[in-house]
Structures are given as C-alpha cells and as structure tokens.
Image: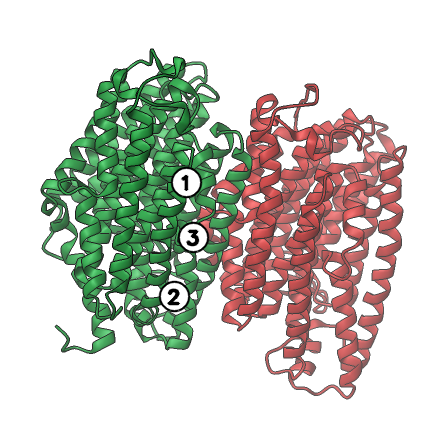
Amino acid sequence: MHIDLFGSLPLIVIWLALGAVGIAIQAFVRDNTRLVFGYYAGTLVLTAVLALITASHKGQTFEGMITVGGFANYFDVLFCGAGLMAMFAARPYLQREGAELDEYYTLLVSAVTGMMLMAHANNLLVLFIGIELMSISFYVMAGFLRTNIRSVEAALKYFLLGAFATGFLVYGMSLVYGATGSLQYDAIAKVIAANASPFPMLLAIGGVFLAVAMSFKIAAFPFHQWAPDVYEGSPTVVTAFMSTAGKAAAFSAFIALFTALMPSSSVMTPQFQQMLAVVSAITMLIGNITAISQQNVKRMLAYSSVAHAGYLLMGIVANSADGHSAIVFYVTSYVFMQLGAFVVVGVLERGNEHYLQLSDYAGLAKREPVLAFVMSVFMFSLAGIPPFAGFFGKYLLFVSAIESGHTWLTIVAVFSSVVSAYFYLGLIVKMYFTESSTEHLPTSTGLAGVTLAVTTAASIVMGLFTSQLLSVFGTWW
Amino acid sequence: MGVVALLAALFAPLVGAIALLFIDREQTKAIKVVALVTTVGTFVASLFLLPAFDASTASMQFVIDLPWITSLDAGFRIGIDGTSILLVLLTTLIMPIALLTSWTPITKSVKEYYVLMLVLQFGMTGVFMALDTFLFYVFWELILIPMYFIIGIWGGKDRIYAAIKFFLYTLVGSLLMLVAIIWLGLAAKAAGIGFTADLMKLRMIGPSIPMDVQMWLFFAFGLSFFIKVPLFPLHTWLPDAHVQAPTAGSVILAGVLLKLGTYGLIRFNLELFPQSSAEFAEPICAFAVIGIIYGALVAMVQTDIKKLVAYSSVSHLGFVVLGIFSLTVEGVQGAVIQMVNHGLSTGMLFLCVGVLYERRHTREISQYGGITSVMPKFAVLFAIAMFASVGLPGLNGFVGEFLTLLGAFRSPFLGSWTYAVISASGVIFAAVYLLWMYQRVMFGTNDNPANKHLRDLSRIEYWQLVPLAALIIWIGVAPRTFMDLSEQSVRAVVSKVEHFKFGNHAH
C-alpha cells in the first residue's frame, strides 16, 4: 500500500498531536488549562500551516480513501481557523462560568479532526468516521456546563437525534454500497454516471437517506428541529463553534458526496436537484420566518443558522463548479459572521440563561459601543447587505442557481432575505434606537476580543478579495 | 483633470469619514468642522468636472475601469455623462448644506452622525457614477445603512417604524433588481461575450433580449426604482421617512435620494430595455399622473407642514416619471432638470420647515400665523422656495414642469394629450396647497404668544438658504446653462428608444 505521507501531513499531525501527545500531556500535567490551551492552539496553527503548504499537492492516498490537497485543504484551514477563534472566545467564557477544564480544548480539537476527515473523505466509511468523531465531540461539548440543566438537556437531545441521523447515514451507505458495489466516491460516481446500477431503486433510496442524514447535520428542513433547542441550550461558545464550523464541515462532505451522487449524465440527477431545491426553499423560509418571532437572541441566531443552510443548499442544487465555489465562499463568510455574532452573545450573557433576551440588548450602543458596532456588522452581513461579506457569497449563490435554471429558488431566497432583514434589523433597532432598561453589567471580552476583531475585519473586507478567493477555488473542481 | 475630479468627488467623503473615526468623540466642534470642510472640499472638487466635461457628446466621460471580481466580470467602473454630472453636482451641493442644518440641532452621538452622513454621500455619488451593475448595486444598498441609522437614531417620535419601513421597502425592490442583474449577466454570456456586469456591454445586449424575458427584467429593475422615486402606489414609505427624519435627513431624502430612482429609470430601464420602455410607457405614465394628482390632494389636507412638503414630493416626482416615460427629448430633458429643481426647491422647503421647527418644536400649521412680521428675511427666502415649488415662471420649477408637460403632450408613445392635461391640473393644485400653507403660516396676525419673539434667520441658516435661492433663480432665468450639459445624453437615449420602436427612419 502506497501512502502519500506529504499530502497527508495535516491529517497525520493533528491526529498524532491529539491522540498521542495530547493524551500524554493530560495524563501527566493535571489541571493546567493554560498549557493545554497553548498546546492545542499551537496544534491548530501548525495544522493550518501544513494544510496551506500541501494545498497544491493534489491526489488520493490510503488506497483512494482519502483525498489530499485542493478544496479539502482549504477546509482544513477554515476548520483550524474557526477552532482557534472558538478557543479564544471559549477561554474567558468558561472561566467566567467557572467551567474551564482542559478537556474542553481536547474535545474541540478532536471535533476539528473529525471535520478534516469529513472534508478529506473519498470513501463512505471515512466520511462516517469523520462525522461520528465530530458529532460525539459536539455532544459532550454541548453538555459542558454540566450543572446547568439547559446545557445537559441540549446535550441529551442532540445525542438522541444525532444517533437517529447516524442510523439514516449508515442505512443510506449500505444501500448505496449494495446498488453500486463500492464505498469509494469515484467508483460510485462512475456507476451512477453510466446509469449502470442493477438496483436503481435501492440507489435512489440510499441517496435520499444520505441526503436525510446530511440534512440533519446542516440543520435543513424537515430535519432542523433539533437545532434551535440544542443551539439555545449549549454553552454559547460551543454553539458558536458547532453552528459554524460544524455546518461548514457538513457542507464540505455534502459537496463531495453529492458530486458523486449527482453526475450530470445520471437520470436521477434532475430529481435529486428538485428534491434539494424544495428542501432549500422551505429551509430558508422556515428559518427566517420563525426567527422573526424569537425573543431570545441565541434562539433567533439559531433559526438564522437554519436559514443559512437553506441558502447554502442552493449551491448543491446548482450542481456545478460555480455552485460549489459559491458554497465555499459563502460558508467561509458565514463562519466569520455567525461565529462572531454568537461570541458577542456569549460575552454579554450570564450563566447560560440571563441577558439573552432581545430586551436585554436595548441601548447596548450606549453601554458597549464597540460590541454594538461589531454586532451590527455581523447582522448586516448575515442579512446580505453590501459591502459586507455575506452579500458577495449570496450573490455567487444566486448566480449559480439562476445559471442552473433555478430562478424560482433565487426569488424565494430573495424574499426570505427580506424577511431576514427584519429580525436582523430588529436587533440593531434594540441596540441603537432604544434606551437601556437593564442595569449596566460590567463585561470583559478578554481573549474573545481577538476573535471579534478577526471576524469583524473579515466580514468587512472579505468582499474585496472575492476575485482572488474565487480564482483559488476555481482550480479545484 | 476630469478623472481626478471624479475620483475626488467620489472618495473625499469616504476619506473624511475615516478621518472622523480618529477624532476624539468629545471634540464635537472639530468633528463638525472636519465634516463640513470635507463636503465643501468635495463640492469644489466636483466643480472641476465642469470645465473638463465635453457637453457635445453623449458618451461616458472620465471613465475608470478596474477589475474587481474577474470571473464575474464585475469591476470598479465609473464615469459620468450629461445626466449624471448634474446629479453629482446636486449631491455635492446639498451635502454641505445638510451638514450646516445639523450644526446645532444634532447633539446626540455627534461623531456617528457625521460619519454616517459622509458614508451616505459616498454611496449616493457612487450610484450616480457607477457604470457596472454590480458596483451600482453595492452603492445602492450601501445608502440604506446610513440612512436607516440617521432616521432611526436622530429621527422623531415614530422613527423606528419609519426607519424599518424605509429599509424593507427599498430592500424588496433592490433584491429583485439583483436577480435581474444576474440574469442580464447570463444573457450576455448566452450572447457570447461572457458573464458581465459591464454596463457598456450590457447596453448592447439589452435590446436583443426577447420581449417575454425583457419585460420581467424591466419590471425587476423598475420596481426598485419606482419604490425609490416613489411612484404611486409605492409611495407609502416616503411620508413616514420624511416626517420622522431629522431636517438634514429630509433634505437629503428629497434632494438626492429620490433622484436615485428616477436616475435609475433613465440609466437602466430606458437604456437597457428600450422596447419594454416603449411598451409600458402608457401604464407607467398613468400611475405617474395619478401620483401627481393624489400627492397634491393629500398634501392639501395636511395640517403638518413637513408632511405637506413630503406629499408634494410624491406629486412633483410624478412629473419626473411622466417626463421620462414620455420618451421624448423635451420630456426627458424636463425630467432631468426637474430632478435638480426638486432637489433645490424641496430641499429648501425642508430647510425652512426645519428653521420653524427649531424655534417652536412644532410643525402644526395652526400653531403659526403672521410670522412675516417677526422673521422678514426668512419670509422672503421661504417665499422663493415655495414659488419655485409651485412652478412660478422665472423660477426653476416652471422650466421642468413645462418641459415634461410638453413632452407628455407631444409624445408619440403616449398618443394622447390627456396625460398632459390632467397633470397640468396638478400644477394648479400645487399652487393651492403651497400658497394656502404659506398664507396660514406667514401672513395674518401674529396672535400666538409663543410666536411673538421668534428670532429671524441666524447667519448659518441664512447661508444655507441663499445659495439654493440663487440657483433656483438661475435655472429659472437661464436654464440653458444646465440643460446643455445633459442634452446630448438625453437625445441619445431617446433616439435609442425611438429606433427600436419605429425603426431607423423616424425623425
């Protein structure tokens, strides 16, 4: 068996850092969160650098089970970056809540490792391992405030529903395997493209099951119901991480998996596209319309996260290189703006239940001008108003959807964007246009300030570099 | 020189806004001075466009074309022609005046206010200069954010409602425009020149799009502009926004923001979709005429001066739309000059309302009466603004309204003189509501004790109004100075529409 060691460096390094060295450090050094924090931050930086170095080294290894280079490496960098930002935000948050244990960082890095496997997967089993590694880390992280009943409830709910989704995933995989005779993406694609499966019905059902499982992971209708409860109950810094990087990881797998399942020559592709288009349309409508009536900011952002899964699905529906580039671009900007927004919520809240209401944000611009400013940047960006990053991603998604003949979907997206503007603006109204009713709580951002600075800057200037990013993406498909 | 002036006029406000960020927020005086100097400097820079501008050509001048998103051929493309130069100058003129009106009334969050004002100017100038659909859209939406905050933070009692309504109305229109922009780009791709946002290329593609598709694109662009204008029945955001906005906000809304819509109609709807423009000229003019009459009638029954002026805008902008969709040289020329006129005269009316409001903190007409006796200087300038708005010959309003009516009367596309005749009655109504308002506020006996000792205009107020009054008289007496600038551009647009409607041999 030939192993492309150079290409697999990012995966191998993070694996060893986590599995061998990380465990050893925790075994011998007790309760030194600062050391563990520094160690894992270093690990993520190193992995991201290695992913950048090996990005142009494209190929497959481990008998074709792993893809290296190209877009998988871009996602590595994104996951590591999101992980770092989440770590910076988590430290002051967990210290304030009195829940900082060094295991938190281990879990976070193991989630990142799972995400990287998902992006690198070229085989259904590798995908499965990646998804499980990420999800199980998330289950534990969701319940990390273990004396807080809402956190524990979120973890349990997430675990039960996640297990259910895993059932669909494995069942779908087995059906696809039965219908095509392979677990490798490219081998599956070959059979489907030639319309040569002896069991087209099984293949179709398997494909639908895989779509169901992925819809769970990205929180798309009708499998989105877990998301608001879990996102609301989990510690905010965990929500910030799993609703962004987790979604990006699911989309990286979604792209690779459905490129294989929907080759243009397959007779099933139009039906799949249609099914996903309907899911996409309903997801964005449900997410945005439900968000309007939310009084809890965290829950509102959770529904907004559902809606964004709907927008992102447009790129899968388009089923083209442009569509996939659009997803990668949009999901990147989404990671910045949504993560930043949750971090602001995390800085302001107390004990996972206080100061989370919309009314608590009244007059925030007076009390915390900087936090109010960055929050409004995130809100405008999430609403897709230029010149912020969210607009450029949306534009790219719209282009790809219209080009693939889904103008109606774009028009639905347009109207749901208007709906979304209403609640994003609602928060700005509270912060800027109304007077404060609650007493002034002293807040300190601490390390989270780094995260906020990075996410704000990215949300503002990312649009300027659209061309450069796209030309990088363009070389991958 | 032209290119430098163009860049300076566009970017100076942005530079000023960034500079303001570095001034301590307690230094309100310094903030105001820097902002004012920026806008005055921008105005002076924009004046340098005039000597460099060649009025004998319809083509775009001082064009800058830099790549931005190459794969979608969206670029930083700016330039101006005869239509946009007037509107750029109007913008740069109105802004320092708007800042002067804010000098004393704005005391809350001074720094944010001036930063937003300058960003607003950047966006508005950008809209008038953009020669790229993508860039145009970015500027178009960029305007929403500062205006939303200006209404929402420094506005009146119902400011939140007004701000959200303003934002969502505009957003509905503009997002559909975004879909149309993408579709146009794809039409260019289908025509073999690749996906593009380059307006100059799209102008050639536009007319070749089959009518069944072109119609939808026409309305997707049109809806966005009709909301902004606003055309009846899409006008309901306007009275709220106007009444709730602080004086400077109203001046900018009336002076510049509404023109973004009418400018867009000429720049995009007429130039890109000539066949659809000809096809739908009649229904659109019908709505314009309804707007003229409706706006005037509603203005007549207002008891709040600011609301009255706001509804008069609905009526006046109806003339602009009528002129544009008469699709004649007279009509479109009249529309262009009427845009400038409305900016000057309605802007000035709002300033006058602001002057009264600053003294009495009420805008109810019944609270006033006999103000002339205590504020003689104000009375003269208020009268000039009022008469300009009525359309008195010798002042600017007459020129624009006369030309648009003439255009509507002779238009081969409308084919009926009824549009012109009914609209002309709007001029009469305007005389009724404005003169009546002026009479109730300024004449009669000054018997309200609160009005006995009102100060006349301060020096700052006086110098806000005088330049506008001078321009109002200038355009009224010698409109050629301004209309020569736009004539070739207007002729080119109109002949393009005529070409597609009647073939080569018409005229």
**Do the dots labelled 3 and 1 sit on one chain?**
yes
**Which chain does the numbered disc 1 sit on?**
B
In this view, A57 is above or below A455: below
Split into 4 quadrants, where in the image is the N terminus of chain B?
top left
Location of residue B315 in the rendering, given as x and y in whole percent from the top left corner: 34, 48
Q: Nearer the viewer, mark 3 or mark 1?
A: 1
User: In the rendered structure, which disc, 3 or 2, sits on the residue that comes first in sequence?
Assistant: 2
Q: CA distance from mark 3 to mark 1?
A: 24 Å
Dot 2: what SS?
A: helix
The colour applied to the residues of chain A in this rendering is red
User: In the rendered structure, which disc, 3 or 1, sits on the residue that comes first in sequence?
Assistant: 3
The amino acid marked with disc number 2 is Phe
**Do the dots labelled 2 and 1 sit on one chain?**
yes
Location of residue B306 in the rendering, given as x and y in whole percent from the top left corner: 39, 34
As drawn, the label of residue B227 is: 3
**Which chain does the numbered disc 3 sit on?**
B
Residue linked to disc 1? B301
In the image, the chain rendered in green is B
Location of residue B361 in the rendering, given as x and y in whole percent from the top left corner: 43, 21
Dot 3: what SS?
A: helix
Residue drawn 31% across the image and 60% down it: B199
Q: Quadrant of residue B275?
A: bottom left
Pointers 3 and 1 in contact (C-beta within 8 Å): no
Residue drawn 32% across the image and 60% down it: B268
The amino acid marked with disc number 1 is Val
As drawn, the label of residue B218 is: 2
As drawn, the label of residue B17 is: none
